[in-house]
Amino acid sequence: MLAVFADTHGTDEPRLAGRTADALTSADQVLHAGDFTTRAVYEAFERRANQLAAVHGNSDTTAVQKQLPAVRTIEWNDWRVLLVHGHEHTPTSLPLLARERDADLVVIGHTHRPAIERLGDLPVLNPGSHADPRAGPPTHAEVHPANGAIRLELRERDGTVIDRVRVAGK
């Protein structure tokens, strides 16, 4: 399973609880779409995750921005996942970047609002924010393999699924 986070906006610790905390420690890999804010929060994620792939966001300190790229592509279960914060991308530029990176799925943050959307044929996952939500509950996302496809889930802190979408394999 991939556990997906964004927009933590912490100063000293990642402010995790419930299913959200469990997802971080039990996932095969953790993705974070930026805005840890401080290096201490980034390092707390890094210590707890089995494997962490992250990008910086617009609210990250200079130290975090120097440590993390703005764009990252990872391989997971035969899927190429493009990871960006999202503040520098539009609904036009994001699919172009995904095509350039040969991505099958895009993970973004920035809005603090959980969403599973499509830009044309491109699935886009925004996990919302587990620590600083806007217009809704604290959320994270989980991505599960599903017989050649993937299942994208948006979950509240207590584990309640608020949206679930199956994305067919390539």
Image (spheres, helix red, strand yellow):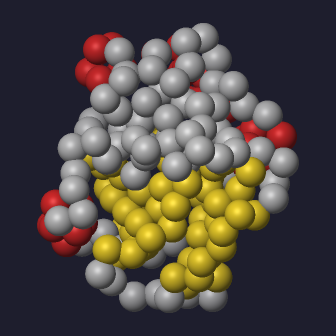
Residue 103 in view:
yes
> Residue at the location (39% across, 75% down)?
118
Residue projecting furthest to the front: 135
Does 74 appear above or below 36? below
Quadrant holding the C terminus: bottom left
- Measuring from the top left, give residue 55's x and y in whole percent: 36, 38
> Residue at the location (74% across, 51% down)?
156
Numbered-mark total: 0
> Residue at the location (81% across, 59% down)?
160
- Measuring from the top left, give residue 58's x and y in whole percent: 31, 29
Query: Left or right: where does residue 72 sit relative to residue 9?
Result: left
> Residue at the location (47% across, 87% down)?
169
Nearer the observer, 91 or 41:
91
Q: Quadrant of residue 48?
A: top right
- Measuring from the top left, give residue 37's x and y in whole percent: 45, 20
Does 123 appear above or below 42? below
Query: Left or right: where does residue 140 sit relative to residue 67?
Result: right
Quadrant holding the N terminus: bottom right
Query: Left or right: where does residue 166 sit relative to residue 68?
Result: right
- Measuring from the top left, give residue 7's x and y in whole percent: 50, 35
Residue 51 in view:
no
